């Protein structure tokens, strides 16, 4: 297969795993207290915000305590006037991050497994390189290239560390909704990106805050999470000023919606035989580096 084919596979692989991560997503502003008894109303509002913040901060631990769950995801990526949607369903081990998913994109079907921080994907027949059905990407090496340094971006069990970047003023309780037949409470959040691991580098691409919506059940577990990321483009050097306007890089927006159900379900994530796998980690790392 040509090198361009390898690059497309690598891009799809990285997109698939990013689509399946549990991070944080879409937000709103806090409400002010009513006018009656100002001090009492202010205290009541503060108490409500404190309770909302605690609910959000503890949600990741409460969800991870369930050990496993079924998961569905939908990721829509938009750039330069075009968009693409990846849908997936499967099961995830909330303790170690292993997962088994089936992804669909552009009419194609992809089998995906994450085993010990190694991403395996089986694209449609004939699309994997070297005549082998599976490709592999080492997520740890990709994370190192991204300089995020935080495996919690790919591990729901460690995502609670991200919640520490949430302040009381950044959490708003926003009504109720039914998710998968379960009554949930919705919380709108803004996360201080600077407080995340390697926050200075992340802020350059994400801006100062990362918005999030969480829908929690009556046990405080995450049933749905929506993430809206607006990734800033990295300027590219141009040969002449006449080319700058036509080839100037544009930002990318990514909306990811995750839903969890059937906590405690069985997860069987096994690595494919080595003889059936082509490693594309270097391709993924090079591509990510070129995009910066």
Image (cartoon, helix red, strand yellow):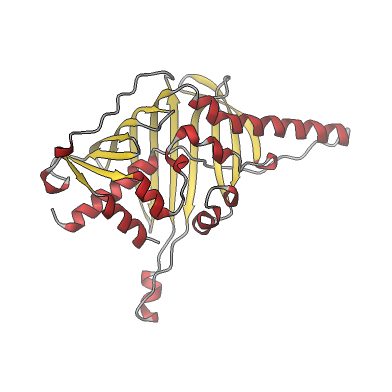
Residue 131 falls in image quadrant: top left
Q: Quadrant of the C terminus?
A: bottom left
Residue 82 in the image: above or below residue 225: below
Which residue is rendered at x = 42% and y = 19% of the image? Answer: 262
Residue 258 in the image: above or below residue 1: above
* Front-most of residues 278 and 251: 278
Which residue is rendered at x = 44% and y = 29% of the image? Answer: 259
Q: Farthest residue to the left: give it.
A: 131
In the visual, does 147 lie left or right of 170? left
Coordinates of residue 281 in the picture (x, y in percent):
28, 50
Q: How many marks?
A: 0
Which residue is rendered at x = 86% and y = 31% of the image? Answer: 40
Which residue is rendered at x = 62% and y = 41% of the image? Answer: 166
Residue 153 falls in image quadrant: top left
Residue 253 in the image: above or below residue 103: below
* Front-most of residues 285 and 102: 285
Coordinates of residue 31 in the picture (x, y in percent):
72, 39
Coordinates of residue 205 in the picture (x, y in percent):
49, 57
Coordinates of residue 250 in the picture (x, y in percent):
42, 62
In the visual, does 157 lie left or right of 109? right
Residue 214 in the image: above or below residue 196: above
Residue 71 falls in image quadrant: top left
* Front-most of residues 246 and 88: 88
């Amino acid at each position: 297969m040509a090198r361009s084919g390898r690059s497309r596979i690598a891009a799809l692989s990285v997109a698939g795993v990013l689509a399946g991560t549990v991070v944080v997503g879409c937000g709103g502003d806090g409400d002010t207290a009513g006018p009656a008894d100002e001090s009492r109303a202010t205290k009541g509002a503060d108490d409500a915000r404190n309770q909302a913040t605690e609910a959000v901060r503890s949600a990741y631990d409460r969800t991870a305590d369930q050990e496993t769950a079924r998961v569905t995801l939908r990721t829509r990526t938009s750039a330069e006037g075009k968009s693409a949607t990846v849908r997936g369903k499967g099961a995830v081990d909330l303790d170690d991050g292993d997962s088994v998913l089936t992804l669909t994109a552009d009419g194609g079907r992809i089998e995906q497994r994450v085993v010990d921080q190694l991403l395996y994907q089986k694209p449609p027949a004939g699309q994997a390189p070297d005549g082998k059905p599976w490709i592999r990407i080492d997520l740890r090496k990709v994370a190192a290239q991204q300089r995020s340094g935080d495996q919690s971006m790919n591990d729901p069990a460690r995502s609670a560390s991200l919640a520490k970047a949430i302040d009381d003023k950044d959490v708003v309780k926003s009504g109720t909704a039914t998710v998968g037949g379960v009554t949930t409470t919705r919380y709108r959040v803004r996360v201080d990106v600077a407080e995340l691991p390697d926050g200075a580098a992340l802020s350059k691409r994400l801006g100062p805050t990362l918005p999030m919506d969480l829908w929690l059940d009556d046990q405080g577990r995450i049933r749905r999470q929506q993430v809206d990321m607006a990734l800033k483009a990295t300027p590219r050097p141009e040969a002449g000023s006449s080319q700058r306007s036509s080839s100037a890089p544009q930002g990318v927006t990514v909306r990811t919606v995750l839903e969890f159900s059937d906590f405690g379900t069985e997860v069987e994530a096994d690595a494919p035989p080595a003889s059936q796998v082509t490693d594309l980690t270097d391709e993924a790392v090079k591509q990510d580096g070129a995009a910066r």
